[in-house]
Amino acid sequence: LQFTKLLSEPGEIPIDADGKNVFVWAYGVDSSSRFSIHTNSGSTEVDFSLYKGPDSTDNSSSDSTVTESVSYRGRWKVHGILAFTAWGVLVPTAISVSLLRNLYPSNFPWLRVHFALNGLACIIMIVVFAIALTSYDTTGRNHFNGTHEKIGLVIFVFVLFQVMGGVFRAHAPKPASAIADTVHDHENVVNEESDEEFTDEGKKVEKSLQRMIWEVMHKGMGVLLLVLGLYEVQSGIALYASRYSPETSVEIAYQAWIGAGLGIVLLLFAYSKLRDRTPKTT
């Protein structure tokens, strides 16, 4: 069904070609000519400023029209796919690699994998942020007016701080024997950077106050960013659907993906804790 309507008509609510508008809709499936209640109805909010192409002009006359730019829809689709890649794949995997490190062989470089995944997610987030920023610049719309945009800005700033904090972190303490080993054996540098709690003669090396504060802040920020990121992707899927298509299959698939991934990680984490508590026999 397609129809056209003037943006401004006497006796009717005007349509804002540069902002958000709420539309109500209803339809029925009865093919007979009798009057009946609509079987489906609802409302949706559409932001026409995001549909205008780069070459669109702002005309306030009654015969103005709004044309959706295919390039804009493509921009937001790429924006969403990249955001999902970062928050639906890379960041959860990076956190899982750290969370489940007790399950790996002792020589597995989990910290480097953790760094690499988070670093790649950070680069993707810069691209995601740039796509949104340039899209709004093209339309001339003010930035960060909606909840989705504001949370996106918070996530972007926090991600930069989190990555920098990981690079310039306070290192875990090491016993003298481990430090001496790194001098004679270059391969042991991997162990030096593993952030494992080293022990010397069977005694756990005490962490510095700076290290303990960093761990609390790093882990807390990581959990906060993951929750915000997952919510932001969910919000973006719903926003895209409201603008272009009411299809819900993508949203359902996303929720199933996150639920399945979370369940698998929790099961593996529980298994690792039970295995660590089980007395080893010789």
Image (spheres, rainbow, N blue to C red):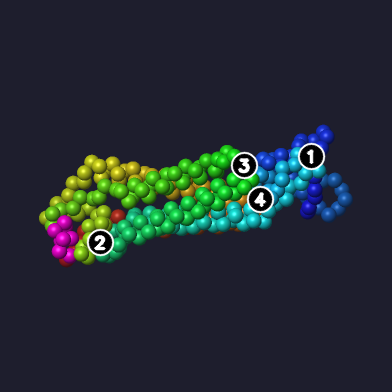
Secondary element at tag 3: loop
Q: How far apart are the alpha carbons under marks 1 and 2?
A: 68 Å
Most extreme residue toward the left, as rendered? 201
Pointer 2 residue? 190
Of the residues under marks 3 and 4, which one precedes in the sequence? 4
Please say whether residue 22 is visible from this viewpoint: no
* Quarter of image, res 78: bottom right
Q: How far apart are the alpha carbons under marks 1 and 3?
A: 20 Å
| Front-lying residue, 8 or 220 | 8
Q: Main secondary structure of the magenta part?
A: helix
Secondary element at tag 2: helix
Of the residues under marks 1 and 4, which one precedes in the sequence? 4
Type of residue at label 4?
A: Pro
Q: How far apart are the alpha carbons under marks 4 and 2?
A: 51 Å
- In this rendering, the answer to whether 184 lies above or below 232 is below
Q: Position of residue 28 (x, y in %)?
A: 78, 50
Type of residue at label 2?
A: Val
Pointer 1 residue? 61
| Disc assigned to residue 141 | 3
